[in-house]
Amino acid sequence: MQQEGNEHTHVESPDTRIRHERRRFLHLFAVTLGAACVEPFLSGCRDERDVLQLSQSKEPNAARHGRVHFEGCRLLADGLLVGEIAPLGLSGFECNDELRDLGDGVFEWQRTVTLRAEAGAQPARVTLDFAAAHASTFSLIPAISYNGNQWGGGREPKGFSHDGEPWSFAFHRGAVPGGTYSEGPKWAVALWAKEATPARGGSCSLVPTANCTTHRLIWPEEERPLTYSGRDEYDRPYAENMTLRHGESFTATAYLLVAPVRQPKTAWRRWIDACWTRTQQNRPARYSPEELRGHGVHFARERLWAEEAEFRGFSIGLLQSGHEWHQRTRHKYEIGWAGQNASLACALLDDFLRTGEKASLDKGLAALDTWVRHGRFPCGLVYAVIDPVLDGSQPGQLDACNMGNAAEFFLEAYELAQRCGVSKPEYRELALGICDFMLKHQQPDGRFGRAWTSTGECLSPDGTIGCFIVPALIAAFRATNRREYLESAARGYRAYHGGLTEHGFATAGALDTDCIDKESAWPLIDAGLALYDITGDSLYLNATEAAAYYTATWQYCHSVPVQPNSMFADMEYDSFGGTAVSTQHHHVDPYGVRFVPGYLRLARLTGNRMWEKRARALWYNGMLGVSDGTLKLRGVELPRGGQCEGYFQTRWGSQGNCSLWLVAWPTAFRLEVLRRMGDWTRLSDPGSGLGS
């Protein structure tokens, strides 16, 4: 992440090779964002104008946004059928549908079902089906399914049915309650529930066929044909019962959105905006930024600190044992990702500069020195997990997330140490060693790879996770002014953003899974803004906002009802604003705090205040469950600064409870945000609120 400001720091004009790469990037954006978006940023060169003309010729026929209206149960646009409401088909019940045009392609749909049969009582399964008149070219169920989840080797729900029966997912499983989206050649359709749990809960299905795509809301709540209950694990199907008596009614309310498809895989952004606009909430901050900083420093310095043989640094986290907490005894010491040794060390150096606390300086330097002295390989890479140095085991894979984190934060540590009055040129040397390795091994298409061996052999070229190298290269350019770092970063960014644009999702950032996820998109936001700052090229700003929109599909825009006598009740947890993990991990975590600075900068640079509201919601949610030393879950007190990693808002583990795993990374991310944001009022101003 980059500090705010410095938008006008420029470097010299690109050389010919970089200009050719930019032309490929322009073509990508012209195809995906629209020629009109690219036009203002062309340099005037003839070859780039040719790229624009070529891209225009390859666009599908963009639908004119004519009048969209219902005629009976049929939805028409410019006189053409977009889709239609399917009859309920529930024997013995009377069904009444009311539609209200809310404007901008959004309709409110209310269906009331009344039992008219003479029977005293009858079970009811009420559905709202809208059959879109297209075969879907891109489909989305936010935080659950991205075009059917065909990427990756995980066993999460694939496709839209299992053994011939459509998947149905409870509202609390998705970031949008009951939200489903499908895209045709001219029009896109989305359907979602007005409330997270009207009356008896609810679920959704998306049923694509060769000629149409049915969007379905279901009451009462069910999950069929199986319940995805843990990573790659399934449980029996689940269904609640709803019985209506003679004359009794049930009313369900939903929203339906229709949007023209001007460019592939982008119309859903209007839907995500519409969802947020109708559900945004005001929330007070649980802690002030200064309180959070104090809790975080205490947790890192007093509870995560570990000393073992040659190692001085931070444990990956704490596990519960009875009423006590102890540091984990395997996979213990990690430089980035979950363990965040380098980031936490920077946080303690920063604490010394703020408070003069000598223990923070000593421990911050000692953690960094551990990797300098014991954690490097001849190829330039470093241990991701340094445990093998202590126990003699074989080094594990060296992934892009850990390598990028190490390089970026060791460069920051070099600067912080200087400000602390300590010269540590070896920190800079370690970071540039990683960056130089990436320069030498960057693939022809611009990607870096997903992971390497300790001798530098690439284990996998795939996954957006490779983009974690890009912020490090940008930091190296800023530290050295060596142009090859910037050129490599720009090539890498274009390659990885191109993958997001082409496929509609990002992949492989969650290292313990192999799937579509949200955290691998963070570098596309952070690095995109940094490249915009350095080059002044607004294409990077557009690219950043596109990546931010993708991460927004993972952000909960509704509050899952809290079950009594649960951990959620103990901590007054609210899912609103939180981010789901991945298609393979269906629970919420506080990772979204890392998006906060990027969202806030987007709000300022684009003038779109929605990003500021989303940022505050992320920040609010990300501090829930942080203990001030008095928080108790199931009678067990959490140490000051500790926070559980996973929040089970759906049928995952024990619904309404937490993982009881006090991992290091949430603390590191909060401290990172506070360290790099000069203005904390945008996080803590009580007068502005989350939804103002």
Image: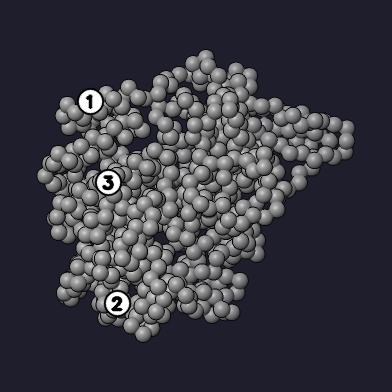
Q: Is residue 86 left or right of residue 592?
A: right
Badge 1 local density, few (<14 within 10 Å), some, or many (20+)?
A: few
Residue with the mark numbered 3: 444
The picture places residue 632, in percent across and down from the top left corner, at 55, 72
**Disc 3 to disc 1, C-alpha distance:** 24 Å
Q: Is residue 220 above or below residue 476?
A: above
Q: Picture quarter containing residue 337?
A: bottom left
Label whose residue precedes the other's in the sequence (1 or 2): 1
Q: What secondary structure is marked by label 3?
A: loop
**Rounded to the nearest whole Å, what is the CA distance between mark 3 and mark 2?**
33 Å
Which residue is under mark 2? 374
> Considering only vertical position in the picture, is 327 above or below 498?
below
Question: Disc 3 residue type?
Answer: Pro
Q: Residue 499 vs residue 283: left or right?
A: left
**Position of 392 compared to 37: left or right?**
right
Q: Residue visible at 30% across and 73% down? A: 375
For the N terminus, the quadrant is bottom left
Q: Residue at x 42, y 47 (%)?
A: 506
Residue 401 located left or right of residue 9: right
Amino acid marked by disc 2: His
Classify mark 2: residues with Cα within 10 Å, few (<14), some (14-19) or many (20+).
Answer: some
Nearer to us in this view, 216 or 559 = 216
Instruction: State if disc 2 and disc 1 touch (CB < 8 Å).
Output: no
Vertical placement of 526 versus 184: above or below? below
Checking the image for residue 50, the label placed there is 1
- Residue 469 lies, with reference to residue 371, above or below; the image says above
Residue 650, visible in the rendered structure? yes
Residue extending furthest left? 12
Inspect the image, locate mark 1, and give the three-letter code of the amino acid beneath it.
Asp
Q: Label 1, label 2: how many angstroms apart (C-alpha)?
A: 53 Å
Decide which of tag 3 and tag 2 comes sooner along the chain.
2
